[in-house]
Image (cartoon, helix red, strand yellow):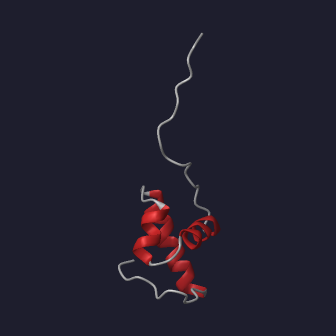
Amino acid sequence: MAETLKKGTRVTGAERDKLAAELKRRYDSGESIRSLAASTGRSYGFVHRILTESGATLRGRGGATRLKVKS
């Protein structure tokens, strides 16, 4: 989705389904929710909700993980 959506516009029906499929495809290929939000001009919460509605398996937060020390 190259163009950004106008801020505050409602996305419903077939347009919402198309957007959800596109965002899910991009998210599943490794793009972050924040980058999807920035590229579409929508909020993090909107993108998160759309992904949840579309059945995407959301990833955990990033960052370093701690290794368990064996005793």
How many numbered circles does the render carry?
0
Could you say which quadrant of the image residue 57 lies in?
Answer: bottom right
Across and down, in percent, residue 17 comes to 56, 79
Looking at the picture, does residue 14 appear above or below residue 40?
Answer: below
State which quarter of the image contains the N terminus. Answer: bottom left
Which is more toward the observer, 7 or 14?
Answer: 7
Across and down, in percent, residue 4 comes to 41, 82
Looking at the picture, does residue 23 appear above or below residue 8?
Answer: above
State which quarter of the image contains the C terminus. Answer: top right
Task: Tell me the residue at 56%/22% (across/down).
Answer: 68
Across and down, in percent, residue 5 comes to 45, 85
User: Would residue 68 be found to the left or right of residue 27 on screen?
Assistant: right
Task: Tell me the residue at 47%/71% (across/down).
Answer: 37
Across and down, in percent, residue 9 comes to 54, 90
Q: Residue furthest top?
A: 71
Could you say which quadrant of the image residue 38 lies in?
Answer: bottom left
Could you say which quadrant of the image residue 12 lies in?
Answer: bottom right
Task: Tell me the residue at 62%/69% (across/down).
Answer: 49
Looking at the picture, does residue 67 appear above or below residue 35?
Answer: above
User: Would residue 6 be found to the left or right of residue 70 on screen?
Assistant: left
User: Would residue 54 be found to the left or right of residue 31 on screen?
Assistant: right
